[in-house]
């Protein structure tokens, strides 16, 4: 097998990937909290993780990928405080927390499909693994890492040598003398393992435990479910960069304190998608979803292409114009493939070798895309280029094999509405209204044609 190098957050260097079991890779990716749609930032991270998985498969590994679905109520801040996200979602929509979880899990899976993100092999839900989480807390209690406060059972981070190694917390220590409100916690970095339901309040999601009725702390599920399905240690663990200082740091602490061995060997983190004005966050109102894009006439795969143009360890600023340019680039690629009518034949070994080197070098997709375009412009016969391009697409996931003879981008929702209204007007023989709608469509730069199937529109600046 070829050498693959990844940047391991744990050691802060590029390392050669050496699997625990020959030819196999266990991969755990932190999944969504299903109280709202995924935003484009979340989806950037899932695309990075999908590329990671595809690169491993491309190299011949059998990958087992587990992604948790956080469907249990957690509090809205890393500090175990604030509102419960699931119950907040439930109140917002007048549904139960369970209905909210089911709805947004289904929406999340649709997003994955539209972005050609392979579905993880297992999608365990936190609420279906309460028993495993309680078992883990019991182990920690037995090993002397827990203490009780009025509102829950906490992990005592001072008892674990090396706590915070992943984030280099010792170096960037909370400055001495700075007072932080830590409530009843003994140390600022201590975190909840089990939270008690507030007295006199019945929560929608709560479970009995040896310590009292309540719900798990939000890092617990990942430690419990990753090791249940992948063993301990397993090969690779990833997430967005925000998970380094708290969530992953605490997953490592719990799992190491419970089992006395590492949780995972390689930790990979994707940088954030940012808006020109700052970060995109699910709890803020400034989030853009995949649906927002399709309503504006953009293809989900154009977003994937946009994301692949930047290395996963670099911040990426969201920008509508750059996204449109990515869509044009992708459509240009589709058009080239449409024009290659030859059957794929023996590929271009030289380009395939270079592509493999790029993707195996810490997932250098910007380079891999540059090689892809170089291949397209090269003098090889179309049959060879097509074969190699289809191979590349096993990593790129841009749907190149599925390019149809005449694929059209979806119409913006506003345009679709006008088309429907015009069809209705014509059905009602309201020619005045039908003409007015034609003019409105033309003002939006669409050419309007009447066909047997109804109104057809074509963007004027496209062929
Ligand atoms: P959450 O549902 O908030 O737990 O986030 C799901 C995944 O998206 C995690 O891996 C986060 O690290 C990641 N994430 C959150 N915000 C962003 C962002 N703006 N850009 C990239 N990844 C993000
Ligand atoms: Zn996690």
Image (tube, rainbow, N blue to C red):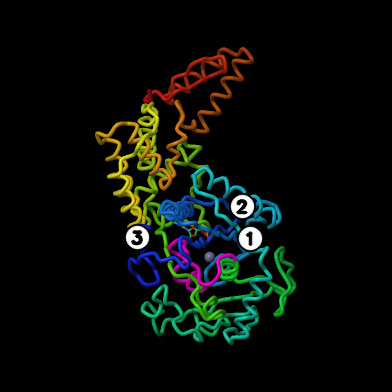
Say if the magenta span includes residue 239. yes
Mark 3 CB within 8 Å of ligand 1: no
Q: Nearer the viewer, mark 3 or mark 2?
A: 3
Tell me the mark number nearer the camera, choosing from 1 and 3. Answer: 3
- Is any part of residue 41 visible from this angle? no
Q: Earlier in the sequence, mark 1 or mark 3?
A: 3
Q: Which label was assigned to residue 125?
A: 1
Residues in magenta, as a range: 229-251
Please state if 222 lies on the left or on the right of 151 as rendered: left
* Residue 344 position in % (x across, y down): 39, 33
The answer to which of marks 1 and 2 sits earlier in the sequence is 2
Residues at circles 1 and 2 in contact by the CB criterion of under 8 Å: yes
Q: CA distance from mark 3 to mark 2?
A: 36 Å
**Mark 1: few, some, or many residues within 10 Å (few <14, many ≥20)?**
some
Q: Which residue in the protein does label 2 denote?
A: 105
The residue labelled by disc 3 is 3
Mark 3–mark 2 CB contact (< 8 Å): no
Q: Earlier in the sequence, mark 3 or mark 2?
A: 3
Answer with left or right where residue 356 lies relative to residue 52. Answer: left
Magenta region includes residue 306: no
Residue 436 position within the rendered picture, expressed as x and y whole percent measured from the top left: 51, 18
Which secondary structure lies at badge 2? helix
Is residue 427 positioned above or below 28 on the image? above
Mark 1 vs mark 2: give the one in front: 1
- SS under mark 1: loop
Residue at the spot x=32%, y=57% of the render?
361
Please state which of residues 142 and 433 is positioned toward the viewer in this rendering.
142
Q: Is residue 154 above or below residue 9?
A: below
Q: Position of residue 277 (x, y in %)?
A: 39, 54
Q: Position of residue 345 (x, y in %)?
A: 37, 34
Q: Residue at x 46, y 32 (%)?
A: 409
């Amino acid at each position: 097998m070829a050498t693959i190098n990844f940047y391991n957050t744990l050691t802060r260097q590029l390392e050669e990937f050496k699997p625990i079991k020959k030819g196999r890779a266990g991969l755990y990716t932190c999944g969504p909290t299903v109280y709202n749609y995924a935003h484009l930032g979340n989806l950037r991270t899932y695309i990075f993780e999908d590329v990671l998985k595809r690169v491993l498969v491309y190299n011949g590994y059998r990958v087992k990928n587990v992604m948790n679905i956080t469907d249990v109520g957690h509090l809205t801040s890393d500090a175990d405080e604030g509102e419960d996200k699931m119950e907040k979602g439930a109140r917002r929509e007048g549904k139960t927390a369970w209905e909210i979880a089911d709805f947004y899990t289904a929406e999340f899976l649709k997003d994955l499909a539209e972005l050609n993100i392979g579905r993880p092999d297992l999608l365990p839900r936190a609420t279906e693994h309460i028993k495993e989480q309680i078992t883990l807390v019991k182990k920690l209690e037995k090993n002397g890492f827990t203490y009780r406060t009025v509102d829950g059972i906490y992990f005592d981070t001072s008892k674990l040598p090396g706590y915070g190694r992943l984030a280099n917390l010792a170096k960037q220590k909370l400055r001495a003398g700075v007072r932080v409100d830590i409530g009843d916690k003994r140390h600022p970095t201590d975190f909840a393992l089990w939270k008690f339901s507030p007295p006199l309040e019945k929560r929608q999601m709560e479970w009995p435990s040896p310590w009292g009725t309540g719900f798990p702390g939000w890092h617990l599920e990942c430690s419990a479910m990753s090791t249940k399905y992948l063993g301990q240690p397993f090969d690779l663990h990833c997430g967005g960069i925000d998970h380094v200082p708290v969530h992953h740091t605490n997953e490592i602490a719990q799992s190491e304190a419970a089992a006395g061995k590492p949780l995972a060997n390689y930790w990979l983190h994707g940088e954030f998608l940012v808006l020109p004005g700052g970060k995109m966050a699910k709890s803020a109102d400034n989030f853009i979803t995949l649906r927002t894009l399709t309503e504006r006439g953009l293809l989900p795969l154009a977003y994937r292409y946009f994301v692949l143009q930047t290395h996963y360890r670099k911040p990426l600023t969201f920008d509508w114009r750059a996204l449109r340019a990515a869509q044009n680039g992708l459509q240009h690629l589709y058009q080239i493939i449409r024009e290659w009518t030859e059957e794929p034949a023996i590929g271009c070994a030289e380009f395939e070798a270079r592509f493999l080197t790029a993707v195996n070098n810490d997932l250098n997709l910007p380079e891999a895309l540059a090689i892809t375009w170089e291949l397209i412009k090269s003098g090889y016969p179309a049959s060879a280029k097509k074969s190699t391009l289809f191979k590349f697409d096993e990593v790129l996931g841009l749907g190149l094999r599925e390019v149809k003879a005449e694929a059209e981008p979806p119409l913006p929702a506003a345009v679709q509405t006008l088309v429907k209204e015009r069809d209705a007007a014509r059905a009602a023989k309201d020619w005045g209204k039908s003409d007015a709608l034609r003019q409105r469509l033309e003002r939006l730069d669409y050419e309007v044609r009447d066909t047997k199937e109804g109104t057809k529109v074509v963007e004027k600046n496209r062929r």
